[in-house]
Image (cartoon, rainbow, N blue to C red):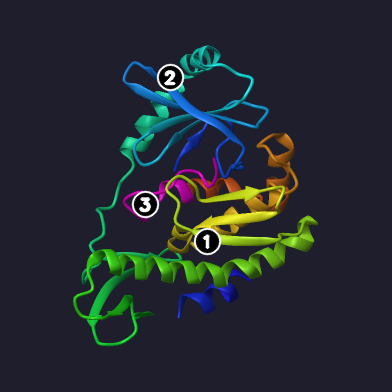
Amino acid sequence: FLDQVFGLVSSGGYSAAGGGVTLQTRAIRMATGFQLGDIAVDVVFKKVKHVRLSVHLPDGRVRISAPRSRNLASLRIFAISKLDWIRQQRIKIAEQPREAPREYRNHESHYVWGQRYLLSVTEEHTVPVIELGHGQMHLRVRPDTDSTRREAIVEAWYREQLKKAIPPLIAKWEPVMGVKVAAFSVRQMKTLWGSCSRGRRTLRFNTGLARKPPHCLEYVVIHEMVHLLERTHNRRFIAFMDRFMPGWRLHREELNKRPVSWEAPSSPGE
């Protein structure tokens, strides 16, 4: 099934609450924070039941999402109790290889569905277009197109690849899970691979997923669709993931550890 879907298209963070893609809600009351020595902790109060601590790529940013009823003093105590864990995750992130910022010039490496391509730029007086072939990503742009505009063209192309690849995956898993997705969207996101609005039954995906192997995209799709069955990352959620994709933990690890950009998102949600 994946070969059929992606054959047509192609012509990390860590969480104390279990990792992976998490539900993002818009019901945010306020954002604040505190310091733990040299570590800044961002705190966001939401309409949630549980406290969630997470450490994000690319720079080890620490964040706590907490119910509105909690106060900063109690959250500081909670963070102090997890300080060793926070430091371990920041070390892991610091040790991960990073790719240099893109300049969108000839011979740069770019990834499409997990495969490496060398960029080949041609300047022509024509509509910008991207084509793949023989290990190269051919980018045709108008003369004097700067790197910012080239980046926008490439990101728009990645967005279109996902818009083609996601609907068959949703259609595949809707009858299996017994859920219905009302709509989905694709956009650039710095700290999310995907998110779910359970009330609206809508999903959102990061354009960076088009750089990842196909099974990573399917993992994120399944993960976000499972949030339509279970809001939080509790035992019921994990049981659903184990049922629908037994190897999801390996896919999550690959998604979060394999570098595909200079500012790789963290776990698909939060």
Tell me where the magenta segment starts and ends, as one range.
255-270
Instruction: Kindly identify the residue that appears in the image at 66 percent across and 50 percent down.
Output: 246
Residue position marked by numbered label 2 in the rendering: 84
How packed is label 2: few (under 14 Cα within 10 Å), some, or many (20 or more)?
few
Rendering coords of residue 103 (x, y %):
23, 62
Q: Would you say the residues marked 1 and 2 are in contact, meaning their CB atoms lie under 8 Å apart?
A: no
* Quadrant where the C terminus is found in the figure: top right
Is 249 in front, or is 151? Answer: 151
**Residue sitting at the far front:** 29
Rendering coords of residue 239 (x, y %):
73, 42
Secondary structure under the numbered disc 3 in the rendered image? loop
Secondary structure under the numbered disc 2 in the rendered image? helix
How packed is label 1: few (under 14 Cα within 10 Å), some, or many (20 or more)?
many
* Quadrant where the N terminus is found in the figure: bottom right
Above or below for 86 versus 1: above
Instruction: Kindly identify the residue that appears in the image at 35 percent across and 66 percent down.
Output: 152
Above or below for 159 versus 225: below
Residue position marked by numbered label 1 in the rendering: 186
Residue 258: in magenta span? yes
Going by the image, does 181 lie left or right of 150?
Answer: right
Residue type for callout 2: Asp
Residue type for callout 1: Val
Secondary structure under the numbered disc 1 in the rendered image? strand
Residue type for callout 3: Pro
Among numbered discs 3 and 1, the one appearing first in the sequence: 1
Q: Is residue 6 visible?
A: yes
Among numbered discs 3 and 2, the one appearing first in the sequence: 2
Residue position marked by numbered label 3 in the rendering: 259
